[in-house]
Image (spheres, grey):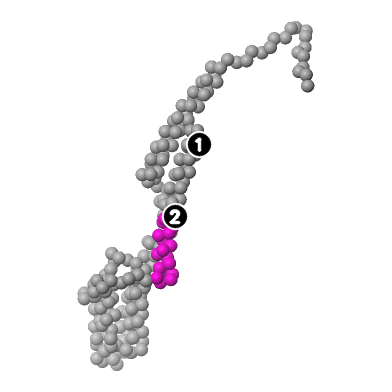
Amino acid sequence: SLRWQRRRLERGQAALIARRVQQLELKRQRRSLQVSQQTEELVTVSELGMGMIYSHSQDSPTRFQKLLEWLETLKGCVETGQFDGYETLVSWIYGPHPTLRGATIKALFGELASKPNQPARVAALRREIEGEICNITQQYQLYIRKYVEVTPLMREECLAPTEEQRWLMRQMSLVDRQIERKTDLLLRMEKDLPRPEAKETQPGTAETPPEP
């Protein structure tokens, strides 16, 4: 009975670990689907008003996908020579307080909107946008490594004992002590049992074999 209880506790502990691994993988798989299928979440008005590039507290695949999409649109405008109508996208990306690169992009767009025939300015604007795309792409890759990928270390971390597992370990320790005491008692009882006496035979006589 005690050994059966011990095996049951072991199965419970293994199930707790398996459930933690399962929850980890399910959580990461949801984010992986957002990345691979570009499943978009809702973008709030406050995020757009503040600037998506500043929404570090709400990192999500949607944030990075939107930033890259809008930057690629701005890059396409530069390639086609369309420098009007940039204000909305620049505002959504950088908000009212743009970064240094954002302020440079905004200023170059404004300058080229009034005087488009400036190859050096066009090259500078293209370079700034490509630099921002590279920066956001690197941030996206770090996000994927941190929140999407499931590494062997993360699975190993699931083996760390939780409060539930500590309770199970204490119970197993109690059962182990009971098994040890019962085994010791059984061995002492067997030692104290009287041994069967051997049958004496007369000298010169053979023991009669048992009948078949």
Instruction: Identify the element where label 2 is drawn.
Output: helix
The mark found on residue 22 in the picture is 2
Which percent across, then down, holds residue 51? Answer: 26, 73
Q: Is residue 104 left or right of residue 164?
A: left
Q: Which residues are magenta?
A: 23-39
Query: Which residue is pictured at 40% across the width and 64% down the height?
Result: 31
The mark found on residue 96 in the picture is none
- Above/below status of 201 relative to 170: above
Say what amino acid the circle numbered 1 marks. Answer: Trp
Whether residue 22 appears in magenta in the rendering, the answer is: no
Estimate how packed mark 1 is, as few (under 14), some (14 to 19) or many (20 or more) residues with alpha carbons within 10 Å: few
Say what amino acid the circle numbered 2 marks. Answer: Gln
Residue closest to the eye, 44 or 130: 44
The mark found on residue 4 in the picture is 1
Mark closer to the observer (2, 1): 1
- Above/below status of 112 relative to 157: below
Labelled pair 2, 1 in contact (Cβ < 8 Å) = no
